[in-house]
Image (cartoon, rainbow, N blue to C red):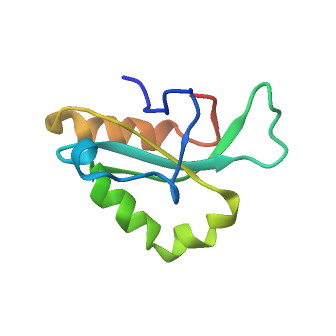
């Protein structure tokens, strides 16, 4: 499994990601919202996790953009990424990620 990035290797910004109909139609998985940790070195960036969850990716991103907690962090330019996993594994994978994510290293 790989976290989704842009073709150029950069992360998608939560509040700037284009959510065109076709590419997100049936996309479900686990999503992660994060931002660069303060004083994080450029050569080995660390990130602070804001939110981890699962569901229909487009719906969740739209909900997150309207979430007051996420809006508070808009100045930090949070990133969003996701992994597509089979529905029967989502709960288990999310539990493992919740247990192991703190500030995370470059993904």
Q: As drawn, is 50 to the left or to the right of 83?
A: right
Q: As drawn, is 89 to the left or to the right of 10?
A: left
Residue 27: x and y in percent read 23, 42
40 or 9: nearer the viewer: 9
Residue closest to the far bottom: 68
100 or 49: nearer the viewer: 49
Residue 57: x and y in percent read 30, 50
Res. 94 image quadrant? top left
Where 85 falls versus 31 (above or below)?
A: above
Q: As drawn, is 1 to the left or to the right of 17?
A: left
71 or 52: nearer the viewer: 71
Res. 66 image quadrant? bottom left
At x 36%, y 67%, the residue is 63
Residue 46: x and y in percent read 70, 37
Q: As drawn, is 86 to the left or to the right of 46?
A: left
At x 14%, y 36%, the residue is 88
Residue 73: x and y in percent read 63, 65
At x 49%, y 33%, the residue is 6
Q: Quadrant of the C terminus?
A: top right
Where 59 falls versus 10 (above or below)?
A: below
Q: Quadrant of the N terminus?
A: top left
Count the numbered circles shown.
Answer: 0
83 or 53: nearer the viewer: 83
Where 64 falls versus 30 (above or below)?
A: below
Res. 9 image quadrant? top right
């Amino acid at each position: 499994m790989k976290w989704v990035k842009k073709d150029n290797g950069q992360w998608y910004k939560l509040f700037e990601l284009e959510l065109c109909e076709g590419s997100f139609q049936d996309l479900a998985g686990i999503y992660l919202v994060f931002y660069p940790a303060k004083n994080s070195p450029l050569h080995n960036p660390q990130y602070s996790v804001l939110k981890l969850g699962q569901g229909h990716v487009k719906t969740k991103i739209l909900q997150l953009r309207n979430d007051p907690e996420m809006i508070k962090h808009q100045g930090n330019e949070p990133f969003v990424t996701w992994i597509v996993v089979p529905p029967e594994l989502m709960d288990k994978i999310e539990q493992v990620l919740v247990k192991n994510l703190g500030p995370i290293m470059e993904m």
